[in-house]
Amino acid sequence: MVTKIGIVIPTAFNRPEYLPLAYKSIANQQGEFELEILIGTPEDKLEAVRAALPAGAKVVAESTEPGLAKKLDLLLRELSVECDIIGWLGDDDLLD
């Protein structure tokens, strides 16, 4: 059985140069696992975020409610139910 890992990246897209790097740092991980990456952003920035990421990147409108915890909670709930491990990464962070 392959381990499925789900990672969300919430972004206001105020630092557009960093998001593609954060995404790549996750997507380039190597190992015996299946990876799901979900990007959450305000609805008015959906197209700009999609344009900054590789084709096929999963980008959704995040909650309009204030607070990072609420946004993370809703994004993590949108991951596939089959995820064995879940996590999140800031849009200006790198996964090493």
Image (cartoon, grey):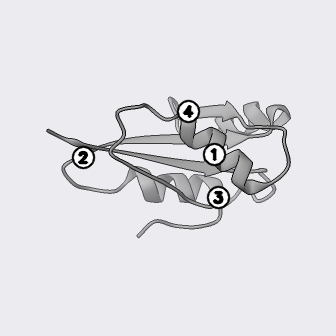
Q: Residue 33 carries which label?
A: 2
- What residue sits 64% from the left and 58% below the top? 91
Badge 4: residue crowd in 10 Å (few <14, some 14–19, many ≥20):
few
Q: Mark 1 points at which residue?
A: 73
Circle 1: element type? helix
User: Label 4 to label 2, Cα distance in Å?
Assistant: 19 Å
Badge 3: residue crowd in 10 Å (few <14, some 14–19, many ≥20):
many
Q: Do the residues labelled 1 and 2 touch (CB within 8 Å)?
A: no
Circle 2: element type? strand
- Which percent across, then down, holds residue 45? 80, 37
- Which percent across, then down, holds residue 12? 78, 50
Q: Mark 4 points at which residue?
A: 78
- What residue sits 45% from the left and 59% below the top? 25
- Which percent across, then down, holds residue 85? 37, 50
Query: In this orientation, which residue lies closer to the viewer: 45 or 60?
Result: 60
Q: Residue 59 carries which label?
A: none
